[in-house]
Amino acid sequence: MRKERVTENVYVFTSEAYAQATAGAIVTGEGTVVIDTLPFPRETREMIDFLRAESARGIRYVINTHHHADHVYGNFLFEEADIVSSERCREVMRKSGEKNLAEAKQQTPELAEVKLRLPNLTFAEKMSFHLGDKAMRLMPLPGHTPDGIGVYVEGDKILFAGDAVMPLPYIFWGDRVVLQDTLRALKEMHLENIVQGHGEVLLKGELDETLDAAIAYLDCIHDKVKAKLSSRTSKERLVNDITLESCGFSPIALDGLVKQLHRSNLLRVYQTLTAKAR
Ligand SMILES: [Zn+2]
């Protein structure tokens, strides 16, 4: 796990074990707010050990940006904290969390001790959050998944965006057009930093360019899949033919994982377009 200090009291922890998944923390005089909890207990414990020493008031709240395993499996280790999420996030975890966790444990021995811990404080759309001298706003950021939220730290102008912002936009479980709207809204926020759900923290000077490239990529995969469909290319061919480079992205980000994400994105667009045509 890699630890980075973004501003005086805001930290980002990046997994070295799984897809550069990130978690964050805002340390205040009244205790600490954690955002997402990483998938593997070993790295989550490292983060907790560091944070417990940072504030005498301890870790008070954990916020989950969305229900995916790599953002919530560490929840159970924060025994002293309330877990906060959107109502949708809790609902998906309640319905499918145990089944998915059981399957994940079969694949990944490191998860053996994980217990599913559901959020116990939920909100419908938005929520304001005040702790110590920090004000945070929790807001919907759908598109990667319908339940996604962001955490905006007001004074610092930092947004924890969950997987709404990643080194490659990822819509396999989500909606392309909805994610584009979310990304456009982020451009209007005039942020200092975006903490992505995976990968490096984005800096002010690169935000516009990065968000524009993500929006353009989502148009690009749509247009290219549509063109292939009208020339009756098979699904298998189409996924191989439309390269990441041809939509303006390098295949090396996230240790090459972006190539897989890209293929899943193409399949999602294919599904959506063929379902429409039927
Ligand atoms: Zn993720």
Image (cartoon, rainbow, N blue to C red):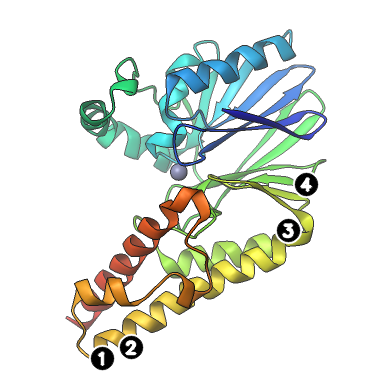
Q: CA distance from mark 4 to mark 2?
A: 41 Å
Q: Is the CB of the residue bearing disc 4 within 8 angstroms of ligand 1?
A: no
Locate residue 185 relative to residue 39 in the image: left or right. Answer: right
Q: Nearer the viewer, mark 4 or mark 1?
A: 1
Q: Is the CB of the residue bearing disc 1 within 8 angstroms of ligand 1?
A: no
Residue 261, image x and y in percent? 39, 57
Residue type marked 2: Ala
Residue 231, image x and y in percent? 24, 92
Q: CA distance from mark 2 to mark 1?
A: 5 Å
Mark 3 and mark 4 in contact (Cβ < 8 Å)?
A: yes
Which label was assigned to residue 230?
A: 1
Q: CA distance from mark 1 to mark 3?
A: 39 Å
Residue 70, image x and y in percent? 42, 35
Residue 47, image x and y in percent? 59, 20
Which of pointers 1 and 3 lies earlier in the amino acid sequence?
A: 3
**Quadrant containing ligand 1:** top left
Q: Nearer the viewer, residue 198 or 16?
A: 16
Determine which residue is flagged by label 3. 189
Q: Is residue 145 visible?
A: no
Determine which residue is flagged by label 2. 227
Q: Quadrant of the C terminus?
A: bottom left
- Per the image, label 4 sits on a secondary structure element best described as loop
Determine which residue is flagged by label 4. 157
Q: Is the CB of the residue bearing disc 2 within 8 angstroms of ligand 1?
A: no
Residue type marked 4: Lys
- Other residues around mark 2 within 10 Å, as few (<14) / some (14–19) / many (≥20): few
Q: CA distance from mark 4 to mark 1?
A: 45 Å
Mark 1 and mark 2 in contact (Cβ < 8 Å)?
A: yes
- Per the image, label 3 sits on a secondary structure element best described as loop
Residue type marked 3: Met
- Other residues around mark 1 within 10 Å, as few (<14) / some (14–19) / many (≥20): few
